[in-house]
Each structure stands twice: as structure tokens, then as C-alpha cells.
Amino acid sequence: MRRPSEEDWAAVVARQPRDGVIAVRTTGVVCRFGCPARTPLRHNVMIFATCDDAVAAGFRLCKRCWRNVRKCQENPVKPG
Ligand SMILES: [Zn+2]
């Protein structure tokens, strides 16, 4: 888990694919890079290496990124 780097944040804002996931502390939701949802405030964002790491930390999956499935692995579609 890390604070977003400049590269991370640029990818969040541009909704570009990137390794890792975006966890938003205020909403408790974890998103993939590229999620079409509203861009969170940077100081609320943490980056996890994997979806499983974020879930283990208590975050739940974004419905738009994971299409209402409940497991990180069940994600055959790209967001958007
Ligand atoms: Zn999302």
C-alpha cells in the first residue's frame, strides 16, 4: 500500500489503465485504474498492489469496476 505517486495520480485523473488498484478511504471502495466513476480527492486515495490486498484491508469492490461481482478474480470486463 502506498500514497499515490505523480505517475499514479496522473493515471487516476486520466482514467488510464495501470497496475494496482485505487482505494478511496472516504468511501471504502476500491477501483481499478480506468474506472469511469468520479475522480476522488487525492489525499483520500491509497494505491494497493492488488485487489486482494485492498479487500483484505477492508475495502469493497466498486460496482462499476467489478460489475457487481464480489471477488477480485471475477472481472473479465474492463471498466467503462
Ligand atoms: Zn470503480
Image (cartoon, rainbow, N blue to C red):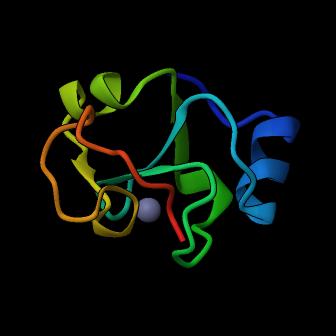
Instruction: Please tell me in which quarter of the rendered image ligand 1 is found.
Output: bottom left
Residue drawn at the location 26% of the way across and 52% of the way down: 61
Residue drawn at the location 71% of the way across and 61% of the way down: 15
| Up-down relation of residue 40 to residue 47 (above or below) | below
Q: Quadrant of residue 54?
A: top left
Image quadrant containing the C terminus: bottom right
Compared across the picture, whether 69 is left or right of 50 comes to left
Residue drawn at the location 42% of the way across and 54% of the way down: 77
| Up-down relation of residue 37 to residue 62 (above or below) | below
Count of numbered labels shown in the rendering: 0
| Up-down relation of residue 4 to residue 77 (above or below) | above
Compared across the picture, whether 39 is left or right of 68 comes to right
Compared across the picture, whether 45 is left or right of 65 comes to right
Along the viewing direction, whichever of 64 and 58 lies nearer the viewer: 64
Residue 43 position in % (x across, y down): 62, 53
Along the viewing direction, whichever of 79 and 6 lies nearer the viewer: 79
Compared across the picture, whether 58 is left or right of 43 comes to left
Residue 62 position in % (x across, y down): 32, 60
Residue 5 position in % (x across, y down): 79, 33
Residue drawn at the location 36% of the way across and 31% of the way down: 51
Residue 11 position in % (x across, y down): 78, 50
